Image (cartoon, rainbow, N blue to C red):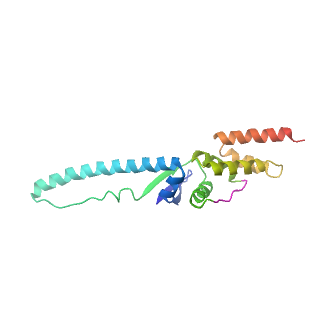
Amino acid sequence: MLRLLVGPEQYPIHGLRAILASRSRLFYMMILAKEKEIKIQASQKKIGFLKKLKEIRKLLTSKPSYQTSSSSISRKLTIVLEEFKPSVFERLVRYIHCGMVSVDVFSVVGMLNAAEKFELECLKNACWEFAVSCIRPELVHDLIASANEYSNCKLTNDLFKEIQKNITESP
């Protein structure tokens, strides 16, 4: 199980490591890096523990038996992702697990940028097509409002250019 803390408020979202890692190379790299970090921390704790144990052995002159389990070290993983809204990231995780997701004008830009970041080409293309279809008078204001939250992303800037192009072409 993987625990993702999403957004500035670090909202917890859970996913299966094997599924997330197998469908997204970035998730795979993030999980691998986190597991490595945990193993390094655990080995440092183990070294400290062994030093203390050695001192105790000297005092007691008897050899206690002990075992450590490396499998329990990497059971609980937590990764922090602050750049996405929790509602958008929940949908992304659902898409990765199930292969389906519902997108609306308020979530499409976040989903588009998340799909690009996590290299989900089919989702990215579907979100782009949907976002472009939302460039009409009754929806464009909502689309722009949601796009402003992701204004530092390349695809959002591409979408703004597409909006501007469609507005200048309209009579």
- The spot of residue 131 in percent (x, y) is 73, 49
Left or right: 90 with respect to 125? left
Residue reaching furthest right? 171
Magenta residue check for 89: no
Above or below, 132 against 94 in this view is above
Q: Number of callouts in the render?
A: 0
- The spot of residue 122 in percent (x, y) is 64, 51
In the image, which residues are magenta? 100-105
Above or below, 102 against 81 in this view is below
Left or right: 23 with respect to 100? left
What's the residue at 63%, 41% (across, down)? 153
What's the residue at 65%, 39% (across, down)? 154
The reply to whether residue 110 is in sight is no
Above or below, 148 against 19 in this view is above
Task: Characterize the magenta stretch by its predominant secondary structure.
Answer: loop
Magenta residue check for 104: yes
What's the residue at 67%, 42% (across, down)? 155
Image quarter hosting the C terminus: top right
- The spot of residue 115 in percent (x, y) is 61, 49
Residue reaching furthest left? 61
The reply to whether residue 21 is in sight is yes
Left or right: 115 with respect to 46? right
